[in-house]
Amino acid sequence: MIDWDDVRYFLAVAQCGSVRAAAERLKVNHSTVLRRISQLETRLGAQMFERLPSGYQLTDAGEDILLLAAQMEATSNALESRVSGRDQSLRGLLRITLPPPVATYLLMPAFVEFARLYPDIEMEVMSRDDPVNLTNREAEIAIRVVYNRENLPLNLHGLKGPDVMGGVYIARDLLGDWQAGSVSKVRWIVKKRNGVPDWAREGDIPFADEPFVTTDTEAQIIALRQGLGVASLPCFIGDADPALIRVPGSLLRQHGTLWLLTQGETRKTKRVRLFTEFIAQKLAGYEALLNGTSIVP
């Protein structure tokens, strides 16, 4: 019989395009993936991949079993979800995926509080921007800022949270310098992939042409606190920081809505239900901070 684990490793390489990426996804070392692929090829008597400089490319034999392998994965996930949905214990692994700023600047205190309330639940917080597949059981809960409700996967259960607004912020000291006339224009501090959003160009302060570019939100905020320029931030970051203030005359814009997402049978487990109820209550308490009404402009 074919070992499902061997098929699982084959599928990971096929989907990721390289052994290294598959090993990272499966949280094993490089040699383990190679050994599993070799076992499957020996069992089936056919080569599954061509090893090319650009990565691993499926052979004809590999293409033939790819759909069947995906069906095996779906069946395995459904089986695990059905069984785990009956788990009513307060032990076990609970994995939460969410954007890094939401974890760092909003929900980490709530996560710590939950962990102290339920010390037998093993929590893994995956703060990352790239999506995690709940259907494939890569996490139990996803907390996401969703821009269009219609884009929510139909197979996931969604619990709607508050709207998330954003504004344009400047260090209080830099604003004072501009008001005193010692600064004529200020620079934009932007994340590389985003640039300056059109909605954020309004305001009383003249902007310089040359931006200061960072690759992540944390570096952007540090540069902003140091008085380098202005930046667009979610209100739950900018309004909560005493060193920052909204740029006079600037606008607020809705970034999206926070959603708590769970999958099928998994959401029925007691630890998942407890966590979603706990975090939903916390988010309701953060509503004014999230939608930009916690301060008077």
Image (spheres, grey):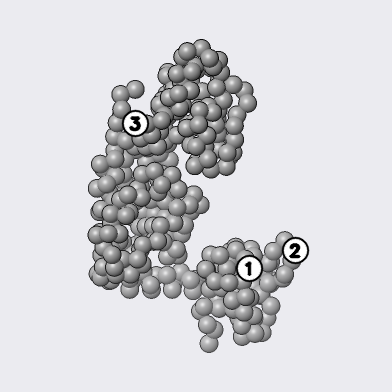
Q: Is residue 234 left or right of residue 48?
A: left
Q: CA distance from mark 1 to mark 2?
A: 12 Å
Q: CA distance from mark 3 to mark 1?
A: 45 Å
Which residue type does callout 3 highlight?
Gly
Residue positioned 27% across, 59% down in the render: 116
Q: Nearer the viewer, residue 47 or 277?
A: 277
- The residue to which callout 2 is attached is 53
- The residue to which callout 1 is attached is 19
Res. 189 visible in picture: yes
Q: Secondary structure at mark 2?
A: loop
Q: Sort mark 3 into few (<14), some (14-19) or many (20+) by Cα contacts within 10 Å.
A: many
| Residue 75: x %, y % from top left | 44, 72
Q: Secondary structure at mark 1?
A: helix
Which residue type does callout 1 highlight?
Val
Residue positioned 46% across, 26% down in the render: 170
Q: Nearer the N terminus, badge 2 or badge 3?
A: 2
